[in-house]
């Protein structure tokens, strides 16, 4: 069993031409003995965005805080605190912060996918 405040987990920062102002934390993963899923927390700074990409596994996403938009099915859709997003395998997707506070979301992926 693992019980830990998410703030105690050191984030990995991402910033480049394709990703801006993103921090990711593996909340529960392989190191914890999780054999089926990986739970991650992402924080996207004001005006930040994740890379636009696609891969063979699905995502289940819960928007924990903030406002933003998700690119899915070839279009942008507004998202906000309390929303859920399902990203199917192979679907091109991207998240961006459209608000003035950090956009925070939980993302669950299968254990065989890269954790970050």
Image: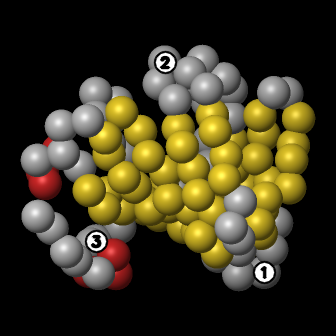
The Cα–Cα distance between marks 3 and 1, rounded to whole angstroms, is: 23 Å
Dot in front, 2 or 1: 2
Residue positioned 34% across, 81% down in the render: 7
Residue 51 visible from this viewpoint: yes
Looking at the picture, how far across and down is residue 36, in whole percent? 26, 35
The Cα–Cα distance between marks 2 and 1, rounded to whole angstroms, is: 33 Å
Residue positioned 11% across, 64% down in the render: 1
Answer whether labels 3 and 2 touch (C-beta < 8 Å). Answer: no
- Asked whether 87 or 1 is in front, the reply is 1
- Identify residue for label 1: 100
Helix, strand or loop at label 2? It is: loop
Task: Report the quarter where the C terminus lies.
Answer: top left
Answer whether labels 3 and 1 touch (C-beta < 8 Å). Answer: no
Examine the image and state in which quarter residue 80 appears.
bottom right
- Identify residue for label 2: 56
In the rendered image, the vertical position of residue 80 relative to residue 6, given as above or below: above
Left or right, residue 25 beside residue 66: left
Looking at the picture, how far across and down is residue 90, in whole percent? 60, 18
Along the polypeptide, which appears first: circle 3 or circle 2? 3
Examine the image and state in which quarter residue 78 appears.
bottom right
Q: Residues within 10 Å of mark 2 (few under 14, many from 20)?
A: few
Along the polypeptide, which appears first: circle 2 or circle 1? 2
Residue positioned 28% across, 71% down in the render: 10
Left or right, residue 17 beside residue 109: right
The Cα–Cα distance between marks 3 and 2, rounded to whole angstroms, is: 27 Å
Residue positioned 66% across, 53% down in the render: 84
Helix, strand or loop at label 3? It is: loop
- Identify residue for label 3: 10
- Asked whether 51 or 93 is in front, the reply is 93
Residue 44 visible from this viewpoint: no
């Amino acid at each position: 069993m693992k019980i830990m405040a998410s703030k105690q987990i050191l984030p990995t920062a991402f910033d480049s031409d394709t990703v801006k102002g993103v921090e990711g934390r593996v909340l529960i993963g392989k190191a914890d003995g999780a054999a089926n899923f990986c739970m991650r927390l992402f924080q996207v700074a004001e005006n930040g965005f994740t890379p636009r990409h696609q891969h063979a596994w699905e995502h289940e996403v819960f928007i924990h805080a903030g406002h933003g938009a998700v690119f899915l099915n070839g279009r942008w859709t507004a998202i906000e605190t309390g929303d859920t997003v399902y990203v199917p395998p192979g679907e091109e997707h991207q998240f961006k912060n459209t608000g003035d506070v950090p956009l925070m979301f939980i993302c669950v992926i299968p254990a065989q996918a890269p954790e970050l």
